[in-house]
Image (tube, helix red, strand yellow):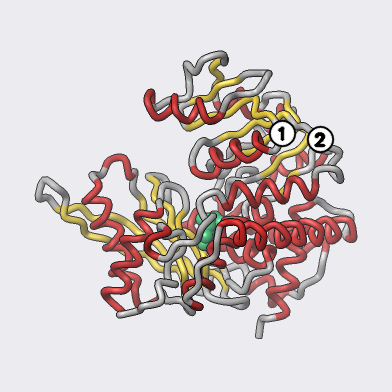
Amino acid sequence: MNNPFQNAMAQLDKVAKIKDFGVEFISRLRQPDRDVRISIPVKMDDGSLKIFEGYRVEYNNALGPYKGGIRYHHDTEINEVKALAFWMSIKCAVAGIPMGGGKGGITVNPEDLSKSELERLSRGWVQKLADILGPHKDVPAPDVNTTPEIMAWMADEYAKITGDKTGATFTGKPLEVGGSAGRGPATGLGGFYVFDALRKELGLPEKCRVVIQGFGNVGFNAAEIFTKNGHSVIAISDSKGGVYNANGLDIVKLAEYKKTSSTLTGFENSKNITNEELLETECDVLIPAAFENVITDGNAGKVSAKAVLELANGPLTPEADEILFKKSIPVIPDVLANSGGVTVSYFEWDQNLKGEKWAEKEVNEKLKPMMEDASRKILAKAKESNTDLRRGAFILALERIQLKTK
Ligand code: GLU
């Protein structure tokens, strides 16, 4: 398995080769400011005690408080969290929000826990880390397998421990406890705005055939939004496998089907496909919206999309990036494509601190121009340096971070 942190650093090195940021600045960015590992003891429902491993990596705060989600996954480990925290620093800079980068996690398969065990685990994470969190220090959010409900438990625990009344230490909360309208679909919607801003430039048709890997919050919302905007989702998968229909899938019906059968396969009017087949499906836009390292040197040669929109974090290895570049398949990088999520998290933080509540329409009207502006600027940077969009995005981000680095 590729080490995601090494991949992230390989991306940084590539950028340093085409633009001189100075050795000192780049070497500072090769390590997080702080990397905290904790053990969380949890009383299980059967009375036994189980110890879980947890993490918070505070990568860089030149632009503002550390910002980034918390991942619950059985494969989560420190190198993954470090990579994700580094990418958050780049992502917030790309999005033009006053936030730095951080990330957290717990090595756990949440499906193995009852709801009350999950709550005790989540509160335990906060108890161990409350000292370093805060609206102006470090602001966590959801990521893979963490939900608004989990954010509500965490925000409540933090308020109990510290007396903080702003609610601004955690974003991605449910609406009733200070969450922002529009936070749920924000990553998918932001990805669509980015795609739409770059579509013509990338030579993509007005109506695209879209293939999506992932049916979680991001994949599902992206599927709905692309469909509503006249594109057709011809294949989609979850971790167990996917379905294909050349004429387009009915996403609303598919979501209902998944609720009752807890799988996508076997859905009416569609052909079952594996995740490997899905990534190689002929289409206009391929959207990896699940995990890191799904497109590698092993399968990148077989990708037959006209463009890739990275809604997952780090879905391509650096080798895969090179292969697609040589095949002239443009990749809209994660740090731009999925930055809508953290941008609306920033809106939530801002609303909490100001005691305001914005309507979903207002949120989306603020999000759209920010995504379009970031897309245009990155395209210009890439053209200026005759490079790909990922390097263009890193150049824009590093310039912004360097300006604020003392
Ligand atoms: N976990 C999301 C990401 O990777 C959102 C982070 C946030 O809202 O702070 O961008």
The answer to whether mark 1 is within 8 Å of ligand 1 is no
Horizontal side, residue 243 vs residue 10: left or right: left
Q: Position of residue 220 (x, y in %)?
A: 54, 38
- Residue, disc 2: 206
Relative to 6, residue 126 above or below: below
Q: Residue at x 75, y 32 (%)?
A: 208
Q: Are marks 2 and 1 in contact (CB under 8 Å)?
A: yes
Relative to 145, residue 246 above or below: above
Q: Tell me if mark 2 has few (under 14), some (14-19) or many (20+) residues whose alpha carbon lies within 10 angstroms of its own.
A: few
Q: Amino acid at mark 1?
A: Gly
Horizontal side, residue 225 vs residue 202: left or right: left
Q: Position of residue 105 (x, y in %)?
A: 41, 57
Q: Amino acid at mark 2?
A: Glu
Q: Position of residue 218 (x, y in %)?
A: 54, 44
The part of the image, by quadrant, that contains residue 78 is: bottom left
Q: Can residue 296 be seen in this snapshot?
A: no
Q: Quadrant of the C terminus?
A: bottom right
Judging from the image, what secondary structure is the residue with disc 2 in?
loop
Q: Residue at x 69, y 43 (%)?
A: 309
Disc nearer the start of the sequence (2/1): 2
Horizontal side, residue 236 vs residue 194: left or right: left
Q: Tell me if mark 1 has few (under 14), some (14-19) or many (20+) residues whose alpha carbon lies within 10 angstroms of its own.
A: few
Query: Label 2 to label 1, Cα distance in Å?
Result: 8 Å
- Disc marking residue 230: 1
